Amino acid sequence: MARDSGPFTLYNPWPRIGWWSTGGLLAVAVILGFIVLGREQQNGPTLGTWTAICRALGITADIGPASEPQPPLRTPSRIAWTSATLAQVAGGSAEHGAFVALNCTACHGEQGVSQAGLYPTLAGMDGSAIYKQLDDFRAGKRSWGAMNAIAQALSAQDAADVGAYFASRSNGLPPFVGERFQAGRTLREDNPAIRLAFAGDPARGIPPCAACHGPGDHKLGAPQLKTQQPAYIERQLAAFAQGFRQNDINEQMRTIAAQLTPDEMHVIAEFYGTGAAVAQVAGR
Amino acid sequence: MQNSRNLALWHYWVAFGTFLPAVLLGAWQMLMRSPLPAPLDDPDAYYASVTLHGTAMAYVVTTFFAMGFGYAIAATSLGRPVRGVAAAWIGFFICLIGTVMAVATVLAGKASVLYTFYPPLLASPWYYLGAFLLIGGSMIWVVLMVLNMTAWKHDNPGRPVPLAMFAITATALLWAWAASGVLIELAGILLPRAFGWSDLIDAALGRTLFSVTLHAIVYFWLMPAYIAFYTLVAEAAGGRLYSDTMGRLTFIMFLVFSLPVGMHHLLADPEHGSGFKFLQSFLTFLVALPTLLTVFSISATLEIAGRHRGGRGFLGWIGALPWNEPMVLAVGLSLVMLGLGGFGGLINMSYAMNLMIHNTSWVTAHFHLIFGGTTVIMYFAIAYEMWPRITGKPLRSKRLACWQLWLWFWGMLITTIPWHIAGLMGQPRRIAIFDYSIPLVARTAPLVIISVIGGLVLLVAATLLIIILVRSHLGERVLAQPLRYALAVNPPRQVPAALNGFALWNAILLVTMVVTYGYPIGQFFFLKSHSVPAIEVTSQESAPTGVR
């Protein structure tokens, strides 16, 4: 009895039963899964054996080199949030940034606090957002008047520095931290601005603005919007909706803005810009 | 079991001490997602709570319970002191430190990634490190179970290993195989990214590795229940086990069949072709074999006991069974829930039918019924059986224990049956807030409210469990009967070596795993990579200033 324990000796019954039944089951499953069922398609012709096996393995036409010429790849931005990028942004020098920022005053206001609806306030904005937009302007991924030429005159380090400078200003946009996400039952909120900002509209595939842009929550690269120039926010939403602006990495803003009505864009911009509705939410 | 008495007791207390707060969290989650007002109505708290509830129930309660049960079985079934008690205590403290690390990180709100990790979601490295210590520490237990069994075999050549010891060793080996997936995922993918050593995270590879764990872990949870079915029920019912060989075959089949099947958790994932999904889905059906074998075997065992106690006629033996024994009552209730949950499981693992219920509440309801119901009710019964033996104090009282088991049973049915139906109506899982003003969602509101009531009943039952255990623990010491395992109708004098050890079955399992997982895992290294940026649920260190 003690001798029949070897898993590879087939002359006693248990290993034989074990190996043969396992092998048989695997063979049946492989034939069924890879050859018989892999050939069938619900709304198409029956496939050849080779195609069926490739399909069953998960090897489809989009894996490996394509045989036909593909349209050129269009990337919305050159920036990826790798550790190297984040390290450069985090290592920006605010002192040197203050010097670079002298160029911004004419349009973006004294110390980055904009006085005009066309231009966003930069003071207090997250450094990584500024860094990304400057690179997008430099690479032509985003176009606006003089900004492309200005960005081309700046190095990546300059962009990190000026980002660090504006991020350190306390007189502009409020920081992301320090406020709780206004969640709960906001899906049933009557005010459309508050509803869209904090609950979105799942039926139209619109996520809440606040999940990325604050207040209370934040995704990397997204600028905070509270107290931003309302006319600027509304104009950007329209630009995303119409496809003039295309530098959102995952096409999320183009998708969302295309679902918004002009009225909704307006109330969201007012909600974030003037902050009146924010107080209303906080007072709930 | 002198030297292992404290060992078993401490493991059990950690398990049940974690259990009650985790049930409380579960009940609150039920309330939070219902139309009723809930305290602390906040989605962030909800996801942290889901993570804590899952981590506690899936890793902490089960692992500690299985370890304690294993040490108790090794001592009582082999009839000699457990070897390696010092190593066992070291393992206990490693697991405990891991638990504290993981729980503290979730409570700090830095690890709301759910216990299945879901890369590219990324939590604080402390959470992953805690999970790694907890799961890795339990490998000491695995080694000790195997060592104790082989040492006994060496000292008793030619004699069959007692079924209880054979079964717990199968459980330990199953856990080692199952844990390999999650340990490799933690060490190779999640921890390097969490510590910032890499930029990207291969989400698809991570999910595939976790699928190795994800189904077998369920059988790791279930195994103590099956061990009780085979080795404790017959004695409690006053009869004999129908077949010792069927028991051995069952545990061997669970070891072999519960592992190469995990990809049925990935049926909707795009990174795998249809072939391997079908292959593993097909093999999943084989898990029904040991389950059906057990239902037959245990029914036969109970019938033997019933007829021995004077039951007559076609079904008369059922009434003759001692239903006031917690172990007998638990097995009856457990089998009812196994029947309901098992058929639900057949739908989940079917490649085509799965699409109807994928990621709906049906799935959550299913695993609560089969794990929280079938399995956990047997954990209670095992605790009631073991407590007097470990503490030397009688159970206070059997009547209360039966009440507790009934409450848990009804609570579980009231919770999970409406939950299943809500899932069939399309209610998605892992959602903190439902807008019940939408007509489609409003239809599920009454069902969710019934589930909340069930959750409260479960909370009462869990509290009652702790009351019974503490009351018994504080009672007066009396001489307890030693734990006796069920004697088979035909007690084995000699069994084939293949049914007395695991070498053959481990070899078969290894080949099967290579066939079923070799390509699905290997493809990521030579065909395609699914590396993507991680989504950090909480991190203030690795992001620039101002970023939460």
Image (spheres, rainbow, N blue to C red):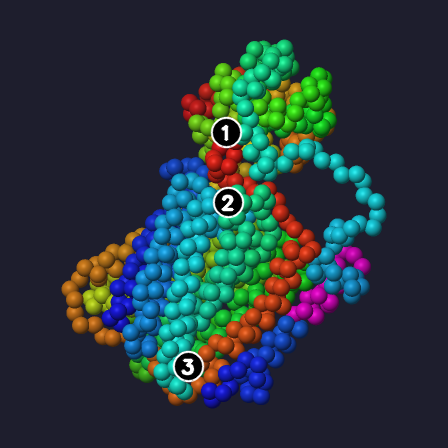
Q: Amino acid at mark 2?
A: Ala
> Does residue B161 lie above or below A180 as drawn?
below
Q: Position of residue A105 (x, y in %)?
A: 60, 12
Numbered range of the magenta stretch? A29-46
Question: Which quadrant holds residue A8?
Answer: bottom right
Q: Residues within 10 Å of mark 1 (few under 14, many from 20)?
A: some
Q: Looking at this view, is B313 or B370 the one in front?
A: B370
Position of A67 compared to B504: left or right? right
> In the image, which is nearer the foreground, mark 1 or mark 3?
1
Residues tagged by mark 3 and mark 2 found on one chain of the structure: yes
> Does residue B179 lie above or below A113 as drawn?
below
Upstream in sequence: badge 1 or badge 3: 3
Mark 3 — residue? Answer: B244
Instruction: Report, in whole angstroms, how far the alpha carbon at label 1 lies from the one at label 3.
Output: 65 Å
Q: Tell me whether the residue at label 3 lies in contact with that at label 2, contact meaning CB atoms closer than 8 angstroms.
A: no
Q: Position of residue A71 (x, y in %)?
A: 81, 40
Instruction: Report, in whole angstroms, how far the alpha carbon at label 3 lies from the one at label 2.
Output: 48 Å
Q: Residue furthest right?
A: A68
Q: Looking at this view, is A216 or B34 the one in front?
A: A216
Residue occupying image coordinates x 53% and y 71%: B256
Q: Tell me whether the residue at label 1 lies in contact with that at label 3, contact meaning CB atoms closer than 8 angstroms.
A: no
Q: Looking at this view, is B255 or B472 the one in front?
A: B255
Instruction: Report, in whole angstroms, how far the alpha carbon at label 2 lies from the one at label 1.
Output: 18 Å
> Does residue B349 lie above or below A78 as drawn?
below
Pointer 1 chain: B
**Under tag 2, what secondary structure?**
helix
Upstream in sequence: badge 2 or badge 1: 2
Position of B431 compared to B36: left or right? right
Mark 1 — residue? Answer: B545
Residue occupying image coordinates x 84% and y 45%: A69
Mark 2 — residue? Answer: B194
